[in-house]
Image: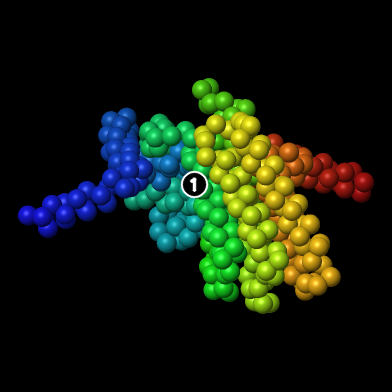
Amino acid sequence: MRSKTGLVNRVFALFTERRIWVRQIAVTGLAGAFAWLVGDVLVDNGGVVAAIVCTLSIRISLHKSLREGFGQIVGTAIGASVALTAVTLFNFGFVSVGITIIMCAIISRALHLGEVASVNVPVTALIVIGPGLSESTAFHRLGSTLIGAAIAIFFSYFSHPKTPVGRSIEQIATVSTKAANLLALMSEGVATGYTQKEAGNWLAKARLLIEEIPAIRMQSVEARGHARWFPTAKKDEAEEIYIQGIALEHTVVQIRTIARTLFDSAVSGGIADSTQKAIAVALSAASYAISSKFEDSDISADDAHQSATSDARDASSALAESLIGDAKDADQEQIVRGLSMVANIDRIADSLDQNSPALRDVITPDEPAKDKVLGISLRGQLIRLKTRIFGQLRKIFRR
């Protein structure tokens, strides 16, 4: 009886521990079924195409589904035109299929469509070019595609329990906790005397933290984009969360550098006993400063946080004095490594206080072109086209 109860609990836990994933697949299944129903009612035999497009377009957030839906619409328009032209010239067969795929790839490249839309173009073209193709059938499939994309955009609002800002705060809190714990672990290791193996584990964990930064940046970009058009979103809050994500990125980079410095020190013989305590205290102060900054969902800095970053700066200054005092007797390479940790901790404090010009005065690149629906905006493409046309006209008139 107990074994059966334990088995049921384990099976039940598989779903309760993955609530967000369960919610997303449930919303996706419901959206696909609804798209099939609406597509079949509004368009003759349009349910299958609408369900396919809906499943391709729906994503974990409304912002992403809007981009996917727009890419699907652009792909449909291009794919339908290319498919109809190819079938008209070569009839339905392997020649028209091959030409359709090649031309869709060329047109996607010429229009600088992003990665998502570039995939959608040939997929939609193959849906349109299917058996029984005629002008009316093409328009039916075009309509079904638009229905599927619209339903995906609508249902994506319910696929995640939190807003883009809420998801950004959650990601930042998770990574910052890991960062603070790693610094605390390094502080304890330095205080008790660490080995090269332990330093290697710290460096490996720091590298894993770095790999989580792109997800935070992508989510904060989504929060900013969502706040620009969604009426209930707060632009100032989204912008502040974006800056906070950049600050955490700078902090994690410094932590990885510290882990690498400790590893190099272990390879070279270890840290001098005279500076061991000062390094441990500085790392502990930096760990507490990170925890103090990100432990609350409130993005405004408070007195406790300011005190924590001040303590981190004081500890790094004490470490610098200790290192300079031992400069004559200690190994010069160890002194240099120690001073680099001083600079790392100071940068962490500056990033947490968000008073560093590197955070706000340097323009952070937008999301990669491959993640956009249009790699180059329509306005930019029109300006380029205009420049090329006028350039050719000038050459002609000069002749």
Q: Is residue 185 visible?
A: yes
The residue located at (82%, 46%) in the rendering is 392
The residue located at (25%, 49%) in the rendering is 13
SS state under label 1: helix
Report the residue that reaches farthest toward the top: 231
The mark tally for this picture is 1
Give residue 206's quadrant in the image: bottom right
- Residue 226: give x, y in percent of width and height: 54, 32
Residue occupied by mark 1: 174
Near-viewer residue (167 or 333): 333
Near-viewer residue (282 or 65): 282
Q: Is residue 357 left or right of residue 282?
A: right
Q: Is residue 84 left or right of residue 303?
A: left
The residue located at (77%, 57%) in the rendering is 320
- Residue 259: give x, y in percent of width and height: 62, 63
Q: Is residue 25 visible?
A: no
Q: Is residue 302 left or right of residue 171?
A: right
The residue located at (41%, 32%) in the rendering is 157
Give residue 274's quadrant in the image: bottom right
Callout 1, which amino acid? Thr
Near-viewer residue (380 or 10): 10
Q: Quadrant of the N terminus?
A: bottom left
